[in-house]
Image (cartoon, rainbow, N blue to C red):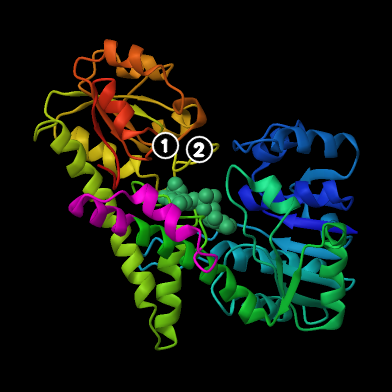
Amino acid sequence: MNITIIGTGYVGLVTGTCLAEFGHHVTCVDKIEEKINQLKKGKIPIYEPGLDTLVAKNITEGRLCFTTDLTTAIPEAKAIFIAVGTPTSRRGDGYADLTYIHAAAKEIAPYLDNYSVIINKSTVPVGTARQVERIIQSENPKANFDVASNPEFLREGAAINDFMRPDRIVIGVESEEAKQVLHDIYKPLYLLERPIISTSIETAELTKYAANAFLAVKISFINEIANVCEAIGADVADLAKAIGMDGRIGSKFLHPGPGYGGSCFPKDTLALMRIVQEYGENVRIVSAAVEVNSAQKARMIKKIRDMLGGSESGKTIGVLGLTFKPETDDMRDAPATTIIPALLERGAKIRAHDPKGMEESQKCLPPEVQYVKNAYEAVENADAVILMTEWNQYRALDLEKIHSTMRKAVFIDLRNVYEPARMKELGFEYSCIGRK
Ligand code: UDX
């Protein structure tokens, strides 16, 4: 099938590349010429494991191409995915900014000669597919098309696997013809027996928000329980294992930490809160999760201060990991972007390392941060080390070497990577989340 993807951001690029890998002929369109020129050469603007190889392979095999020109990409496509950005509105009210979606609908409308399905892949408020439908109809009353919603559930760092082996595919469709097109797109997944759930368009749109909000609630829940564990001397790692073995609860997303970040949870929880308000409803539990998440980041700053004897002033702190999670270079809403500026403001010196995120960090962290080549350089003569993101390379550090090079052996493990007993044995003053 000929498929066109509008937008070569994270979602558009992964979707387009994986659909090409399925065997479809995919054209990815973006307005930014420089980006398209780079992509044509196989150069990827983001770090996502395995994506560069897959892009190069599909370009070579002739199933994936990149262009800035809509005029040929649209009439030839049976399916058009809109995968443009929906950032939080600059008005600061939590709404998703739909400017790019509306612009995409307007731009594709004149070229919709043959029947095609316009599929929203971006995370969009309920009702957006209808807006797209109205925009296209008013721009081109003769256009022959259906709209559909097909939310993505990709995790950064694992996006290709998530696309190729999804737990489920959700399609919001209203006509048999559109449903058939969506089924044909995902046919390669029938072999793996991945379920396709067909719903109304509104249900599909809301499903994405509900899924992300539920996961955010789960993380905030375990973060609060971890704090309770600290207060009463219990161990959250054992507790999470014990409750996670209950099939009704499940063991995933029960890792306490410095609070969730990234491009989805912070943005989508806020957007959901605003959407439901319009309908006179409430998602109190989601509002609480958002509040707990901010409090968790603030709590981390206090934890660090306490471990430094009450003041960060003049202290050198080595920071290991800056991105919001491992295996990405994404710094959006990363806990580091809240914690590091607060420490700098109180006079700390920050020496930071991240395997992939140092370039992005320089765009969003204060210029005083010093970047170093590896974990050991970050902790040299430091008064404390903070393990901020659990990259694999920080899981097996030479702890004796670290201990001997630090000025004060204070180890603050915000991801519970190390065993408290072992750290004590090695002579560290050690603090983690929810464990003694
Ligand atoms: C998330 C959803 O998982 C995905 O389905 C959706 O499409 C996009 O949003 P992503 O943001 O890439 O994906 O990362 P995820 O692995 O879900 O982690 C999000 C944040 O939660 C990270 O900051 C992570 O550190 C944190 N987290 C996750 C925890 O603190 N504890 C956990 O147990 C799990």
Residue at disc 1, secondary structure: loop
Label 1 crowding class (10 Å Cα cut-off): few <14, some 14-19, many 20+? many
Residue 411, quarter of the rendered image:
top left
Badge 2 is on which residue? 326
Q: Is the distance from the Cβ of mark 1 to the nearest ligand 1 atom less than 8 Å?
A: yes
What is the three-letter code of the residue carrying label 2? Pro
Do tag 1 and tag 2 residues touch (Cβ < 8 Å)?
yes
Say if the magenta span includes residue 232.
yes
What is the three-letter code of the residue carrying label 1? Thr
Badge 1 is on which residue? 389
Question: Which of the two residues, 168 or 240, is positioned nearer the viewer here?
Answer: 240
Residue 422 image position (x, y, % from top left): 33, 27
Cα–Cα gap, marks 1 and 2: 6 Å
Q: From this viewpoint, is residue 223 visible?
A: yes
Residue 399 image position (x, y, % from top left): 36, 18
Residue 201 image position (x, y, % from top left): 67, 79
Question: Which of the two residues, 227 or 286, is positioned nearer the viewer here?
Answer: 227
Residue at disc 2, secondary structure: loop
Q: Residue at x 40, y 44 (%)?
A: 334
Q: Residue at x 20, y 41 (%)?
A: 303
Question: Which of the two residues, 25 or 392, is positioned nearer the viewer here?
Answer: 392
Residue 244 image position (x, y, % from top left): 48, 58
Q: Residue at x 71, y 53 (%)?
A: 163
Whether 116 is drawn above or below 412: the answer is below
Say left or right for 61 vs 141. right
Quadrant for the C terminus in the image: top left
Whether 221 is drawn above or below 427: the answer is below
Whether 314 is drawn above or below 256: the answer is above
Q: Residue at x 59, y 42 (%)?
A: 157
Whether 187 is drawn above or below 181: the answer is above
Task: Please give the range of residues in magenta.
Answer: 223-249
Label 2 crowding class (10 Å Cα cut-off): few <14, some 14-19, many 20+? many
